[in-house]
Image (spheres, grey):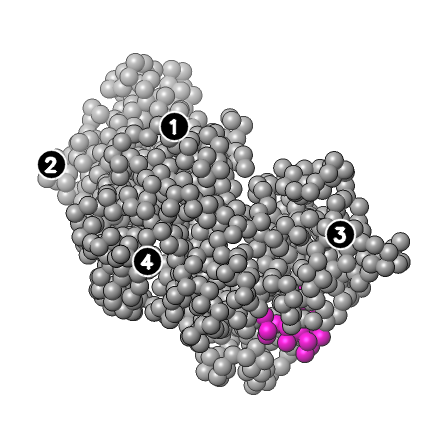
Amino acid sequence: MSSRWPTQLVVGTVLIGLFVGIGLMSLVWTPHDAEALNVAARLAPPGTEGHLLGTDRLGRDVTTQIMVGARNSLVVAVVSTAAALVPGVFLGLVTAGSKRASREVLSRATDVALALPGILVALVLATAMGASNTTTMVAITAWFIPVMARVVIGPARQIMAREFVEAARASGRGKWYILIRHVLPNIGPVVIVQTSLLFASAILIEAALSYLGVGAQRPTTSWGMLFNESQAVVGEAPTLVLIPGVVMVLAVLGFNLLGDGLRAALDPRQTTKAVV
Amino acid sequence: MAPLVDVRDLSFRYGHKQNWVLRSLNLSIERGSAVGVVGESGSGKSTLVRLLCGLLPVGSGSVTYDGRAVTDWLSKDPRQFRLHNQMVFQSPAASLDPRMRIRRSVAEPVRALERRKIGDDELESWLSMVGLGPEALNRYPHQFSGGQLQRVAIARALSVSPTVLYADEPTSALDVSVQAQVLNLLMDLRARLGLTLVIVSHDLAVVSRMCEHILVMRNGEIVESGPTVDVLHSPSSAYTNALTKAASAVSLRPGNVTSAG
Amino acid sequence: MLSIRDLTVRIGPYQIVSIDELHLTRGRRLGLVGESGSGKTMTAMSIVGLQPREAQITGSITFDGRELVGLTDSQLAAIRGTDIGVIFQDPLRALNPTMRIGKQIGESVRLHSDLRRSAVNARVIDLMTQVQLPEPEQLARRYPHQLSGGQRQRVVIAMAIAARPKLLIADEPTTALDVTVQKGILDLLAQLSEEYEMAMLFVSHSLGVVRKITHDVAVLYGGRVVETGPSSEIIDQPRHRYTEALIGANPGQADPDAIEAALGTPLTTIPGSVPALDAFPSGCRFRDRCAHSLDTCAENPPVTRMSGGHRFTCWNPTHTPVGGELDGAAR
C-alpha cells in the first residue's frame, strides 16, 4: 500500500510533520526563552554559538521565534479553518439542494460575500475589536465560510444530477438524507482538498495580518511579526527576513501537496483493485 | 376493472419558459401487463416514466395510480406510493452510489420505505433472485461489470416487492451478450412475481420481444399505441412505419436484404 | 490496398489486439464487429496512429504498399485526412463549437489544397451537397449546436471526404444517433464509398448495422479475429461459436410475422460477461463462456479457410466445412 502513496502526499506529510512538530515542541522546549532579550547578542548571524539561526535586532533567538511562531500559525489555521468548515460545507450543500429560486438567492449571497476583500474586512474588524489573534481567527473564519460554500456548490449540484441520487429518491429517501449520505461522501475529496488549501491560505493570511500589526501582538510571536520587525535591519541581516520566508513557503507548500496527494489517494476506485 | 395507472391530458415542461416536453398524453396501464414505451431521443419517453413513478411533479393533467392521483399519493403517502412503484435506470454504473457498498445500496429502499432493518439473509435472497452470489454484498460498484450492476439495481428495486417496475433503457448501456441476460431476467421476474412492467427503450426489437403493449412516442406525443403485434404489423402512423422500417433495415432477420450486396 | 499482418497492440502488460491478417481492397467495405474490450476501436485507430500514447504496436500495416507501423506522428498526420479519412462516434466532440460549419469544412479543404478563397467556398458547398445537407448556403453559417445529430455527422463526413481519401475509417458513426437517422447516414456512407471507390473500415458493436453497410465483416473477441468473410454469409451461417452466440443473443427480429411467436420467449444468452484484459483463458479466448467448448479448446484453435475468403478459428464450429467449401489453395 505504502508504495502506492503519491510522492506529493509523502513530501507534503513530511513538511507538515516538521511544521506541526516544531510547533508542538515549542510547548515543552525551546533553545531559549521566547521573550528573553539580549541586546548584547543582537543581530548574531546564523551559525553563531548557541543561536543556530542567529538573533534578531533585540537579541532574541530566531530558532525560538520560528518555533513559537509555528505554534501560533498552527493554532490560528486549525481554529479558523475548522470553524469555517462545517458552516461552509453546510451552506454549500443547502444551496445545491434548494429549489431554483432559493438557490439563486443563496448563491448570489455567497458571491457577494466572496467579492468583499478579505484583508480589508479583517482590518475593519481589528479596528472594531482590537488587534489580536482572536480577531485574526474571526476574520479568517468569516472569509472562509463563503469560499468553502462556493467550492462545494458546483460539485454538489453535479452529484445531485447523477442517476444514483434519482435512484435514492425512488427508494424513498428525503432531501436531507440524500445531501448528507449520498452527496457529502461523494464531494468528500473536494472538501478535504479545499480544507488543506485553506489551511495554507490561513497561514499566509495570519502572517499578513500580523505583519500589518492587526493580528497577534507581543508577547505572542507570529511569523508575520518577524518580517515586520526585521524590515528596518534587512540591509544588515537579510537572513532575518529570509528565514521566516522560507519556513512559511515550506509550510504552505506542505499543505498544498497534501491536498493534491489526498485527492488522488481518497478515491475508492484507486484503493481497491477491481475484481471483475 | 379500472386500469392500474391512468393518465389523462398530461403535459409537462421543465420550467415556465421551457418548451413542452409532453403534450396532452392519454394512456392507461393494466395491472400485470408489460408496456413498452418506444421513441427516439427527445421524444419525452424518459420524462413520461419519471412522472408515472413520481420522480417529477405532475403539473398539468392527471396521473392516477390505483384510482388515486399521484400528486395526492406523494403529498399524503409518499412511502406507500414508492413501495408500489420502483424504477431501474439506464446506466447501472451511475445509478449506484460509488462510495456505498452494495449492501447499503440494496438495503436503501427497505430502510427508507418500510422503516426497518434488512438482514443479510434477506439481501442475499434478493441478490440470488437476480443471479448474484452473497459475496457481492461487501463490494463496491466499481468492482462489478455493467451487467452485474444492472442486476444489483434490479434487486434493489425488487426488495420492496413493488407492483410496477419501471425500467428506463435498462440494457442500452450493456454489451449485446449481456443485454440478453438482463432482458431474460426481467421477463422471468415478471412471470414469477406478477410484476407490471413498463420498459422505455429506443430499441424496437427489445420492446417487441418483451411487451405485449406498445406506445410509440415522438416530440412529446403518443403517435400510436396498442397491442405490439397490431402496431408493428399494421402501423397506422407514418412515423411508426418509418421506425419499423429503419429498425428492420439493421435487424438480423434471416434473409434480410443487404444494400452492400 | 490495406493489409494488416501479425499486428499486436499492447498497453503495459496487456495485449489488447492480436490480429494475424486482415485485408481490405479498393472500394470494399469491411466491418469490425465486437463487444467492449474486443479491440475493434484500438485496431482501427492503430492504422492511423490515433491509439493511446502508451500503446506499443508491432507487426505490419501496409496501405497502398506503404508501411504505416513505425511512421512518425507527423507522417501519419499527413496521411490522415488526405489518403485516409476518419469519423468518430460523437460528431459534437469532433467539431469546434465556436466555429461556423462552413468555416470548419473550409479548413479541411484548405489543408489539402491551395485553392483560392472563392474556390474553397464553392468546394464547401459542393461537399455539403454531396453529404445531402439541406440548403447548404444557409447551413454553412450555422454553429454545430444549431444542427441536429444527424446533420452534424454529415458535416463530419464532409470534412473527412474533403481530400477524396482512398480509405474512410468510421468508428461507430451511427451509435449516438436515432435509428431513423442512422439509416440515412448508412445509406450516405455506402453511396459515397461506391461513387469514389472509397474503401471503408466500419467499426461497430452491431452486427445488424454492419450487415447493412459492409461487404465483409471481421468478428473480434478478446482482441482476436475469430471469424471473417462475406457479411451476409457470416451472419446467415456463422461458423464460429462466438458469432453464433452473438447473433442468438440479439433481440432483433422486428419482423411483424415473428413478433407474436417471439413475445415473452427467452433469448439465447451468453453466460458471464467479457472478462477483464488479464482474465481471458488460454487457447480460444471465448471457451469459458462457450456452450460448445471441448477439451481441445485450451489449445490455440486452428485457422480454417473456406472459399470466398471466409475463415474462422474454432475447434468446434457450427458446421465443419466439407470438400468444396474449403479454400482449394489453402488445402
Residue farthest top in this picture:
A28
Q: Chain of mark 1?
A: B
Q: Is residue A58 visible?
A: yes
- Label 3, on which residue? C319
Residue A255: tell me if it is visible.
Answer: no
In what element is the residue under mark 2?
helix
Three-letter code, disc 3? His
State the separation of the CA atoms marked 4 and 1: 35 Å
| Location of residue C217 by image quarter | bottom right
Q: To which residue does mark 1 refer?
A: B120
Q: Quadrant of residue B110?
A: top left
Q: Where is A98 relative to A234, above or below?
A: below
Tell me the residue at 71%/42% (across/down).
C284
Q: Label 3, label 2: how many angstroms apart (C-alpha)?
A: 92 Å
Assess whether residue C174 is covered by the magenta stretch.
Answer: no
Tell me where residue C32 appears, x and y as whole percent. 66, 58
Classify B243 as above or below A180: below
Mark linked to residue C71: none
Residue for badge 4:
B29
Residue at the image position 24 percent from the left and 52 percent from the top: B66
Provide the residue span drawn in magenta: C186-201
Q: Nearer the viewer, residue A160 or C93?
A: A160
**Marks 3, 2: nearer the viewer:** 3
Within the magenta stretch, is there residue C195?
yes
Q: CA distance from mark 1 to mark 3?
A: 48 Å
Give how far apart the Cα atoms at labels 1 and 2 are.
58 Å
